[in-house]
Image: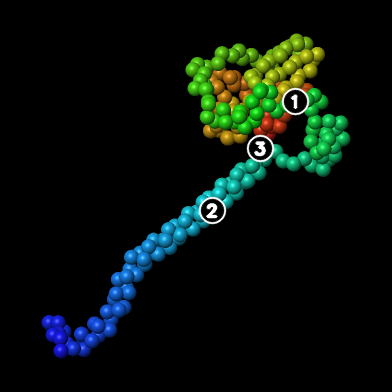
Amino acid sequence: MPAEPCGMTSRQCVDLQMMAPAIEQRVFFQPYAHKIGDILNRRSFIQAAVVFVASMVGVLAGGLWLFLKQAKFGGNPTNSQSMRIARSPNFRNGAFQNQLATPMMTGEDGGLKTILNFVFNRNKRLRPTHPIPSVRCNLSQLAPTEDVLVWFGHSSYLLQIDGKRILVDPVLSGRASPVSFTTKAFDGTDPYSAADIPDIDFLFITHDHGDRLYAPEQR
């Protein structure tokens, strides 16, 4: 009979021999158990990350939708306005049509190349180093009989001719954006505000960019 380990009874030796195969299997599968656990942990992390990103996208999309529902962005035409629009000879196929051919891109490059050049090949001289010089006059004191044109920059100007005042594409908020932290006008290029504009006879909006359709300025 083999010698028993010191301090162990015969019953304990038998139990140890019976447990030996299970212990060997546990030792054999232990490295794989760690790997399986790592895989499960990684999968749980990926699932949590996907849920988090999807939630953030949903929150941002909802916030943007609520932001664009503000009154300053205008709204859809009423029924009477829609009927008036439909009667316009320049309204066809669900949209206003230019009387002359007006291409969106006037250069030789296509739209994609233009966007790529704007993003990756931007000129370092993006902002003037000094305020842009301008001359500010009191528009309310212009003689009604005087024919005059006041250019505000870009496509914005006030035309007074034959006793009529015509305001074209007013961008008078100091920025070409509905929010205050982006697209700010260069220094010196916005000496006028909406409060400086006198009573007008006609307002011309040449295209539907948001900077021209800013509701508080139009009112």
- Residue in front for this viewpoint, 218 or 196: 218
Disc number for residue 55: 2
- Residue in front for this viewpoint, 118 or 14: 14
Measuring 52% from the left and 22% from the top, which residue is drawn there? 123
Q: Nearer the viewer, mark 3 or mark 2?
A: 2
Per the image, label 3 sits on a secondary structure element best described as helix
Quadrant into which the N terminus falls: bottom left
Instruction: Name which quarter of the figure residue 142 lies in.
Output: top right
Per the image, label 2 sits on a secondary structure element best described as helix
Q: Is residue 39 left or right of residue 79?
A: left
* Of callouts 1 and 3, the N-terminal one: 3
Q: Is residue 34 visible?
A: yes
Q: Is residue 15 above or below residue 114?
A: below
Quadrant into which the C terminus falls: top right
Q: Amino acid at mark 2?
A: Ser
Q: Are there few (<14), some (14-19), or many (20+) residues within 10 Å of tag 2? A: few
- Residue in front for this viewpoint, 139 or 92: 92
Disc number for residue 72: 3
Q: Is residue 211 visible?
A: no
Q: Pointers 3 and 2 in contact (CB under 8 A)?
A: no
Q: Is residue 138 above or below residue 216?
A: above
Disc number for residue 102: 1
* Of callouts 3 and 2, the N-terminal one: 2
Measuring 76% from the left and 19% from the top, which residue is drawn there? 165
* Of callouts 1 and 2, the N-terminal one: 2
Per the image, label 1 sits on a secondary structure element best described as loop
* Colouring of the image: rainbow
Instruction: Name which quarter of the figure residue 72 lies in.
Output: top right
Q: Amino acid at mark 3?
A: Lys
Q: Nearer the viewer, mark 1 or mark 2?
A: 1
Q: Is residue 52 left or right of residue 168?
A: left
